[in-house]
Amino acid sequence: MTHDHTTPHRHPNQPDHPEPSSSYELLGVALNELLIEKGIYSADELRTQIEEIESVNVDSHGAQIVAKAWLDEDFLTALRADAADAIRSLGIDPGYTEIMALENTPEVHNVVVCTLCSCYPRWLLGRPPAWYKSKAYRARVVREPRAVLAEFGNDIATDVQVRVHDSNAELRYVVIPLRPKGTEGWTQAQLARLVTRDSMIGVTQAKAATAS
Amino acid sequence: MSARFEVGQSVRIGDRTEPRHHRVPAYVKGREGIVVCLCHPQGLPEELAYRESGEPKQTIYRVRVSQPHLWSSYQGEAHDNLEIEIHESWLDPL
């Protein structure tokens, strides 16, 4: 059959633009359309919110907090006392949830998961990576954290405690990775470049000084 | 408000079914742990999820549980552990 456009017909959906694949997804689409139709929020407000969340830049948010904590003992003390307040003092919006900074030490390595859904400090780290939301990560990192970390290339020495934090309820967590060796005298901007999203979730270490 | 538990205290996480939405995952129910931190009081998710008041707010405890206690077949190190947030009404003293 030749492909002409004399009669209207539907083209197959592109793989990157799928129709809702489940009844729940369809329900979500319908609910959203109804909320807009009833004026609870506008389509533009929804778009703006998505844009805001997607614009959060790890380098200008989370990484600055970590670099500051590495450099400034007073800031680190403030971060321990009330992380949200300390983050606000840097001019960074910590979001509406309680925040806790988890300091890695030579004795303890912290890693964060939300086993129940995908709770994540979006205002500091942006949107969570797909693997963070995957059932495999959520189920496995609480049960076999060392194996999961090893898959991220992060082998934790046996004399270091691995501490998993299930972000199951009201708090959001940011890991403060260990400051890389050989960074004495570095500026906050230089240090921040070593701080990656994954190191603040705790699946990796900060970048080595040679990698900058 | 006064908190029922203090840092360092041994507690057991409630081992009960709750038909409604709640934030205590099955894998920690009935497990024993130690309170490591008290967090700001929050409403109860079982109620808030259904637009009920969630009041009175409850202290949230961060409870540390030993990994080998959590998983009998745990393959990691004996000193590995997990921390989780538990509302006060889900904790009992040991």
Image (tube, helix red, strand yellow):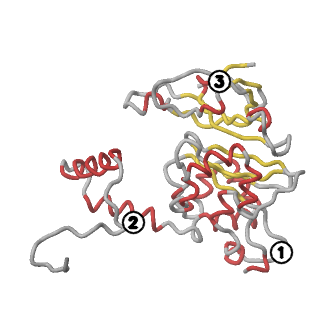
- List the residue tagged with mark 2: A51
Residue drawn at (67%, 45%) of the image: A165
- List the residue tagged with mark 1: A184
Q: Mark 2 — on which chain does it sit?
A: A
Residue B34 location, x and y as percent?
76, 31
Residue A180 location, x and y as percent?
80, 69
Say which element carries label 2. helix
Give the distance between the C-alpha atoms of the residues marked 2 and 1, in whole angstroms: 37 Å
- List the residue tagged with mark 3: B91
Amino acid beneath label 3: Leu
Give the distance between the C-alpha atoms of the residues marked 1 and 3, in whole angstroms: 45 Å
State the mark number for residue B74: none
Residue A207 location, x and y as percent?
74, 71
Can marks 1 and 3 be said to lie on one chain?
Answer: no
Label 1 environment density (alpha carbons within 10 Å; few <14, some 14–19, many ≥20): few
Amino acid beneath label 1: Glu
Name the side, left or right, on which A30 lies relative to A104: left
Count of numbered marks: 3
Looking at this view, name the residue that lies furthest to the left.
A6
